Amino acid sequence: MKILISHLPKNKWWGHGTPIYKDNPAMKQGMIPNQELVEVEMHMLTQLFNRLPVELIEVDFPNFLDQQNTEKRKHDFVFVRDLFISDQNGKVIISKFSEEARQVESDMMEIMLDSMGYQTIRIPDTIDAKAEGGEFYYCSGAKILFSGACRNNIKGAEWVAQEFDVNELVIMKSNVFHLDTLFTPVIKKDNQLGAMIACTSLMDKESINNLRSFSNKMAVELVEVDPEDSIGTKEQLGEFAVNCCPLPGYLIGPTRFRSLKANQLLKELDVMHITVPTTQFRLSGGSVHCLTNEL
C-alpha cells in the first residue's frame, strides 16, 4: 500500500490565523498554531509512516496555495485525505466539495496525481453530487465503503460506491463536517474488517440503528465511544482518537482511546495501536486520518 502525505507550506501553517468553516466546531477564527509543534508533529508523523510496511509518498505543498496574500492562502491542503477518494488500486476520485472554498485544493491535487500516472476521475457537474475525502473510509479487502452525510450528500456517496463497485455502502448522518472525526473502522492483518469504533451520540437515530444492524449482520463488533474520543462538542474539543489511519494489522491515531473497551478490543484483534501527536492540527479540525491518504 502507498500512503500520501503533504509537506508543510513555506509560510507558517495558518500563521495568519485559522478561518471558520461551517460544521467544523474545532475551528475558531484567528487561531494561530504553535509553529514549532506543527513542524515537530509533522516530522514525527512522516518518520512513523516511513517505518511502517507501506510506501510513503511525499508531495510538496503547492506554492499557488501558499500565496503572500493571506486572504488567498489555502493551508488546509495538508489534509490530503479530504482531496480525493482512492480504491487503493490506482483509481482516484477527485473530491467535489460542499465547502467550495476548498475545491481549488482538490484541483491542485488532481494535477499532481495525473503527473504520477494515476487514473483520476471527476464527479460530473451534471449531477448534484457532493463527495469529500474526509467523509469516507474504504475497506478494500471486503469492498465496504463507509460514508458520512454531512458534507457528502447521498448522491455523492452512491456515485462513489458505484464507481468502486462496492459490496456494502454504509451511510452515517451527523452534523459534524467529516465522518473521520467520529468514526473509524479497524482492519485485521488479513485486510478484512475487524471492528468499528464510533461516537454514535453525534449521529442521527436512523444512522445509529443502521450501523448497529450492519454490525450484527457482518458479525463485526461496534464499540461506541464518548465525544471526548471524537471531535467533541461545541463546548469541549475532543481528542480526535477516532481520526485514525487504519492499515492491515495497525491503527495509527493521535492518542489512546479513553474507552477501555476500544483499547481491549484492539488487543484481542491483534491490531497494533500506534499513536503520534497532532495537537496543533486538531485546531483546524484534523488529525492522522486527515493528514494521510491511501493510493
Image (tube, rainbow, N blue to C red):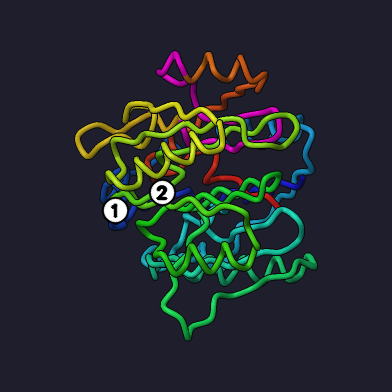
Q: Which residue is mark 2?
A: 15
Where is 62 relative to 231, above or below?
Answer: below
| Magenta residues, start to end | 242-261
Instruction: Point out residue 179 in the picture as x, y percentages from the top left corner.
Output: 43, 47
Of the numbered discs 1 and 2, the one sitting upstream in the chain is 2
Instruction: Point out residue 95 in the picture as x, y percentages from the top left corner.
Output: 53, 66
Could you tell me which residue is drawn at 31 percent across and 57 percent down?
Answer: 21
Left or right position of 223 against 238: right
Give the label, 1 or 2, closer to the camera: 1
Q: Is residue 243 magenta?
A: yes
Could you tell me which residue is drawn at 65 percent across and 57 percent down?
Answer: 86
What type is the residue that disc 1 sits on? Asp
Q: Secondary structure at mark 1?
A: loop
Q: Nearer the viewer, residue 182 or 23?
A: 182
Where is 46 relative to 164, above or below?
Answer: above
Seen as rendered, the residue at the extreme bottom is: 126
Left or right position of 276 against 91: left
Could you tell me which residue is drawn at 45 percent across and 16 percent down?
Answer: 261
What type is the residue that disc 2 sits on? Gly
- Kindly indicate the quadrant of the structure image that contains residue 118: bottom right
Numbered tag placed on residue 23 in the rendering = 1
Left or right position of 159 against 1: left
Q: CA distance from mark 1 to mark 2?
A: 22 Å
- Kindly indicate the quadrant of the structure image that contains residue 182: top left
Q: Quadrant of the N terminus?
A: top right
Where is 61 relative to 96, above or below?
Answer: above
